[in-house]
Amino acid sequence: MSRTARTAALAIGILLAIYVLFTVVFPWVDRQFFANPVLG
Amino acid sequence: MASNTTLSAPRVAATRWSVRLTGVVGWVLVGCGAGVLLYLAYALLFTNIGAERAQSQLREQWQRVEAVPHERDGRPVAAAPAPDVPGVALLEFARPGRSRPLIADEPLVVLDGVTSGELAQGPGHYPDSAPPGGPGNFSVAGHRTTYGAPFFHVDQLRPGDQILVTDRDGTRHTYEVRRQHIVAPSETWVIGPDPLRTGEPTMTLTTCNPRFSAAQRLVVHAELVS
């Protein structure tokens, strides 16, 4: 694997991880612990 | 006098292992720090951008009233949002004698429902509670922080302040704030039919308390005056 390919794979991995964090993990954390104004 | 000490092979291996472990722990901590910073960016920037854009679009749709009078439920409607525009009411706040906006600079569009998807766009109407202006308790939840924080300043409401609610028919109902208190998240009686025990149509706002926490709920009750 060339150095360019490795860098590209790393960049894609980081972007993918950030996407998952922002769309799945953080909304869940937010609902569970911080932002839930609903009663019940 | 120079000392010339040599480490034994097992000790060298243990030192190398220890250095490697320290490196791994260091990278894990860097990762955790980056995660916390990313979460803060998500909560304080990302969610606000989406919610403000959604509220702005909803407000524009609500305020673009149909030019031609139409009918809804067999009754003529003079000025109201088109039937396909989501939302149950427009919410504004006023304090007699104060010209500056209270709580929110622009009217808030209240969506029908309190799921996380609805509350991510603005305040939400508890589906089992009364409709705006109707008998019972018109109850609305909204985020105190993040997601546009529509109820960030709700703690500033005091008895006598007005909550102006425009329903889908274009009718404006005025509620007057009567009480503000803090309850546990399980105390659902506050959104029950008559939390003030007056028998009058009531409105209730609920939001998180304290700010940046969901440990409690800040509750504001208001009574319909016109």
Image (cartoon, rainbow, N blue to C red):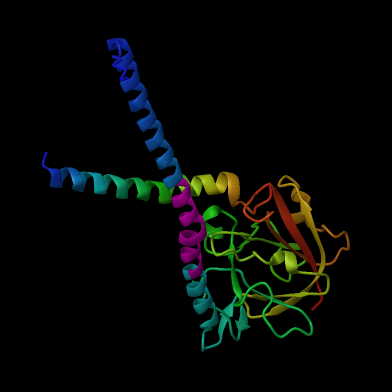
Which residue is depicted at the point 83% across and 70% down?
B159
**Which of these two is toward me, B178 or B216?**
B216
Instruction: Name above or below for residue B20 compared with residue B104.
Output: above
Can residue A11 be seen from the camera position used here? yes
Q: Is residue B183 left or right of residue B67?
A: right
Q: Is residue B186 above or below residue B139?
A: above
Magenta-span inclusion, residue B50:
yes
Residue B7's spot in the image, x, y percent? Answer: 30, 14
Q: Which secondary structure class fits the magenta region best?
A: helix
Q: Residue at x 39, y 29 (%)?
A: B22
- Name the foreground residue: B33 vs B126: B33
Q: Quadrant of residue B27?
A: top left
Going 65% across and 56% down the picture, which residue do you hit?
B211
**Viewport quadrant of the C terminus of chain B:** bottom right
Number of numbered discs overlaid on the protein picture:
0
Give, as a single range, the part of the protein colored magenta: B35-52
x and y percentages locating residue B76 in the rendered image: 61, 83
Q: Is residue B147 magenta?
A: no
Give the residue furthest to the front: B1
User: Percent x, y for residue A34?
Assistant: 59, 49
Name the image quarter holding the N terminus of chain B: top left
